[in-house]
Amino acid sequence: MNTDLYKYTLRLADTALILSHRLCEYTSKGPFLEEDLASMNTGLDYIGQAEALLKYAAKQNGTVDADQLAFAREEDEYANFHLVEFPNQDFGYLITRQFFMDVFSFYNFQLLKESKDETLAALAAKSLKEVTYHLKRSSEWMIRLGDGTAESHDRIQGCVNHLWMYVDEMFDEDEVNTNLLKENIATDLSEVKKKWMKKVSEVFEIATLTKPEQPKYSLVYGKDGGHTEYMGFLLTEMQFLKNRFPQDTW
Amino acid sequence: MAKELEEEDPIKLAAFQAKIDAEIKIEPKDWMPEKYRIGLIRQMSQHAHSEVIGMQPEGNWVSRAPSLRAKKILMAKIQDEGGHGLYLYCATETLGTSRDEILENLHAGKAKYASVFNYPAPTWADMGAIGWLVDGAAIVNQVSLQKTSYGPYSRAMVRICKEESFHQRQGYEIMANMAKGSAAQHKMAQDALDRWWWPSLMMFGPHDSESAHTSQSMKWKIKRETNDSLRQQFIDKTVPQAELIGLKIPDDNLKLDSETGHYSHTDIDWDEFWNVIKGYGPCNKKRLDHHKKAHAEGQWVREAAIAYAKKQELKLKTA
């Protein structure tokens, strides 16, 4: 097994899995019905991506299936970004988290669809279609909330300031990424970062929002198995039936 | 108050009834008696609210779904329910009311939703029971409503029925898998059936003799079949399904009458039925409070969206 490829696949898979989980938690809590539907729809796209990627990871692993990966790992075996663990504190947090992820996914998948790894390339090409729509929606909401009322401007700027600390992780280049980049499998994160910053700046300008300046955040990243305080609760809930009835199928 | 029928123009009223008798659909711009319009708003908004409030018991388990497949299906189902709610809100608005007004009535307790959603969903088997029994009962009612006299409602029902039959199969599949699973799973499935059977039968409403709206609704073909007849169809359809997967319907008096082909059964506990309608069900307050809270917490978002839209409009005008 190519351990770098396995880790890389799990990072993509788990980030989609945990984000889809957060979105499904938002059921019936949206500001109006249309947004309930849009959040669930986005969550469905992400769980679809997670399932396809976890199947690919399971195939590489050879001893587990996608459900075991999704529901029966220890916390430090999950490799998602910290950003997606952040709870649905309100619609502002939900949409800021979504916007940061959508911009990342959009440019990351644009590059990943050219990957030498055919499975990842195909998944990226398929997901890019979905993410294009997600990005349109979350950008529009950032603009509406940023340039809406004084209250919405302050609230969404507060969400941006708070969640900005999680942005670095998405572009952190480590051995896994560097090794796979040499093999033309992984994407060039410095390239993704440039595009991410440009897009975010453009949207912020229209939304009258400002980019925070913050020093680098010092925790073991989610992609390396370190997690926020939120993750334990999330997994307790997500793994509930698997833990309670480990032998049963549903 | 809606205008009484005697106060309506008798010529228009006769022409309206003739149209209904000839199975011609009534469309939003057609003349209609005030009582028809008000009755439809009541029924359609209640139907829409039921879809929307119905997202809550399922939302209680979506974050604990046991497999990727189960989670994906449940998410899609909840999304469908919300979509049905949206579709029905829009159809209701064609009768000259607004979404704000419809929601105000829900929050004020003036508009109802299906009482069945005032029961709790404590186990995963409830996801099966809700799909199989609650959606199963809803389908029987909705298939009949496909022929309802109001055009937008009828067309909404045609579309909704297609998705509801998928929901019913999804629920039955969960129950079937659990019934043949471990002893703990079988027990959970039987327990869910025990808890949801009677509330599902109550979904069809009171006996025809007790139903306040049945007679006029039948004449105007808003309703096409009576509560008791629809309830019987549901029972006849569901009993063999339970037998097939080895679960027992919680009614010792259930018996197939070989002459009529229908099952006879114990009468519903009507005290419980009326108590839940009056607000004393296990989750009435929880469900409504949840909806009110989400709505209140979304106020700043809705205001921002309106403020932004106004700014854009102004920019266009001054450009």
Image (cartoon, rainbow, N blue to C red):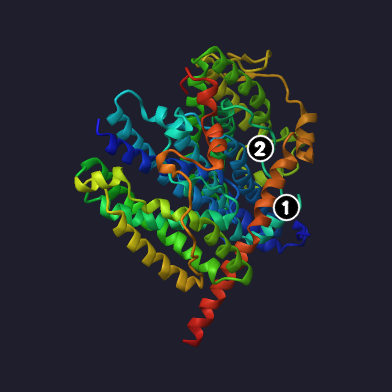
Q: Amino acid at mark 1?
A: His
> Disc 1 on helix, strand or loop?
helix
Task: Decide: is A78 above or below A27.
Answer: above
Residue depicted at 50% across the width and 63% down the height: A141
Q: Image quarter for residue B198?
A: top right
Residue identifier under label 1 = B107
Question: If you read the primary sequence from the N terminus, does the residue marked by circle 2 or circle 1 appear first?
Answer: 1
Q: For the residues labelled 2 and 1, say whether their Cβ atoms are less than 8 Å apart.
A: no
Task: Decide: is B177 above or below A104.
Answer: above
Picture coordinates of residue B56 (x, y %)?
A: 62, 41
Q: Amino acid at mark 2?
A: Phe
Q: Nearer the viewer, residue A58 or B309?
A: A58
Q: Tell which residue pokes out farthest to the bottom in this image.
A: B318
Residue identifier under label 2 = B117
Picture coordinates of residue B319 (x, y %)?
A: 46, 86
Judged left or right of residue A96, residue B36 is right
> Disc 2 on helix, strand or loop?
helix
Task: Decide: is B30 above or below A72.
Answer: below
